[in-house]
Amino acid sequence: MTDSCKVLMIFPLFNAGSFWNYKETCDLTGARYPAAPLGMITVAALLPKHWEVRLINRNTELLTEENFAWADMVMTGGMLPQRNDALHIIDMCRANGKPVVIGGPDVTSSPDVYSAANFQVLGEAEEIMADFIAAWQRGDTEGVFKAPMGKTDVTLSPTPRFDLLKLDQYLHVGVQFSRGCPFSCEFCDIIELYGRTPRTKTNEQVLAELDALYALGYRGHVDFVDDNLIGNKKALRKFLPDLKAWQNKKNFPFEFSTEASINLADDADLLRDLSQSNFFAVFIGIESPDTDTLVMTQKKQNTRRSLQQSIATIHGAGIFVNAGFIVGFDSEKGSVAAGMVECIEDTAIPVCMVGLLYALPTTQLTKRLLSEGRLFVDDGQTQSGDQCTAGLNFETKRPRRDVLDDYRTVLRTIYAPGAYFDRVRRLGRMLKRTRGHRMIKGDLRSFVRLLFRIHNASPGTARQFWRMLLDCALHNPKALPYVVMTSALYLHLGPFARQVVEEIDREITNIDQGYWKIPPFRTAPVEAELELA
C-alpha cells in the first residue's frame, strides 16, 4: 500500500500551427501561452492533500530529467491537438520507468490510441478519481476508470489548484460554471462528452474560485470555459447578481469572456446582467450563413434570425463577438466563399475561426460518415491538428479542390489588413461599454510593443491600424482598450492565415497534378463502431 505520492502533471504541447496559439500576441505582455490548463489543476485538487504535486506545462516551460527523477507518477492528457505530444510523454514515461496516467477529452473519445498508458481516466474525473486513488494505494499497476457520460455532479468539483500555475505565463486564466449544452449540433462532441443537460456549480463554488485567484494577486482576464454559458439560463440568472456583487465588492478586478449560442441576443436582461458583471467578449459558433446547412447540421438555433442584427445587439451591450465558421458541409450546393465573407463583413466580427469540417471521434457526424463509408482511416497521429489545418478527414460531397479553394478565398479575404482593421473600426463604433477597462501592470508596456510590431507587420497594416484607432478615439473612446486587444490578435492571425493559405495552395497543386490520393476508408464493422460510439 502506498500512502504518499509525488505526482508530476505534464500538460502536453499543442500543435504549433494552431489558430488558438497566439504566440505573437502573448509576446506583447510577456506571457508564454494564452490559456492555463484548468482541467489539470482541477484534477490536482482531487488528489489527496498530503500528496505532492508539480505541474509542467510543455507549452510554457521545459520538461527536465530532474522532473522525472522526482516523480513517483506522471499524469498527462488533453485534447485532440495535443495528441502527438501526449503519446510522446507516454513513451518518455515508459522509457524512464514511470507509471503514467492519461485523462482528458481525447483519451475519453479514443481510448485505444492511448493503450500504452498504465492507467486511463475516462470522462469527468470528480466521481472516479477516488477509485483510481484507491487502486494506486493498494498497489495496482494498471487500470481503466470510466465515468458515465454527462452524469457527474459538478457541485462536487473542488476549487482548482491555481497555486500550481505560474500566473504570469498566461494571457488569461479559466473558471467553469457549467458543463454540457442543450443543442445537438451534428459535428460537435460536447454533447457526447458532457451531455445535453447543462449541469452547474453552485454560486458559492464559483465565487470561491474567483476568491482563490484574487488572493493569489491575479488581476485581469478570466475566461468562463463553459461550452455554452447560457445553456442553463435559469441557473445563470441566479448567478449573475452574485457575480456582479462580488465584482463591486472587489472593485472589478476581473474582465470576463466566455462561449455562448447566438440566442444570447434574444435576451436583453441576460445581456445587461453579463455586461454589468464585466463580460467583454463571447465566442459564438455561427458556422455558416446558409440556412440549409444549419438545418442539416442541427444548428437550428442560428436560423430564423438576422445574424447581423443579433451580433449588433450583443455589440450594443458592450460585449464583442468572436465567431467560428466551417467550410465543407455536405449541404453546400456550390461555392460558399462569397456568402461567408459577406456574412463576416456584414456582422463586423474581426476574429473569425474559419476551419475545415472535421469529424471528431464521438460525434453524430462521424457515426453518419462511418455508416456511409466516407470516413478516412485515422492512424492515431496524423489527424491530431485542429480543423484549420487537419480538417476534411472524410470524402467530401463537393470536389475536395473546390472546398479547399473556398476556404483559401475566405481566409485570404478576411485577414487582409484592410478588411480586418475595417471590421475592427466598425466594431469600435458599435461596442457600447458602460465600464472602462481597468489598467493592470504591464498594459502600457504592451501597448508600446504593439505599436512597434504593428509598424513592422505586413505592408499597409500600420496605416489601417492608425485609421481605425483614430476613428475609435473620436467616436467611442471607451472601446479603445478592446480594439487594441483585437489589433494585438492580428499579429498572430495575419501571419497564421497566410501560412494556412500557403498550405492549402500546396494541397490544391497536388490535387491538380494528380499527387493527392484519397486515403483509405474506415473498414471496421460499422455496427460495432456505432455501438461503441
Image (tube, grey):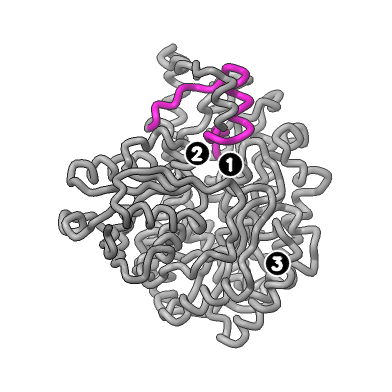
Q: Nearer the viewer, residue 515 or 374?
A: 374
Q: Residue at x 31, y 37 (%)?
A: 116
Q: Residue at x 61, y 41 (%)?
A: 188
Q: Residue at x 39, y 63 (%)?
A: 47
Element type where label 2 sits in the image:
helix
Residue at mark 3: 236
Whether pointer 3 and pointer 1 mark residues with C-beta atoms closer than 8 Å, the reply is: no
> What amino acid is found at the position of numbered circle 3 in the picture?
Leu
Q: Position of residue 473 (x, y in %)?
A: 60, 72
Residue at mark 2: 109
> What amino acid is found at the position of numbered circle 1 in the picture?
Asp
Q: Position of residue 492 (x, y in %)?
A: 44, 52
Q: Along the horizontal axis of the image, is 518 left or right of 140?
A: right
Whether pointer 2 and pointer 1 mark residues with C-beta atoms closer than 8 Å, the reply is: yes
Q: Is the residue 507 above or below the residue 179 in the image?
A: above
For the record, the magenta segment spans: 354-380
Q: Nearer the viewer, residue 358 or 237?
A: 237
* Tag of residue 189: 1
Q: Position of residue 352 (x, y in %)?
A: 58, 48
Q: Along the horizontal axis of the image, is 57 left or right of 404?
A: left
> What amino acid is found at the position of numbered circle 2 in the picture?
Ser
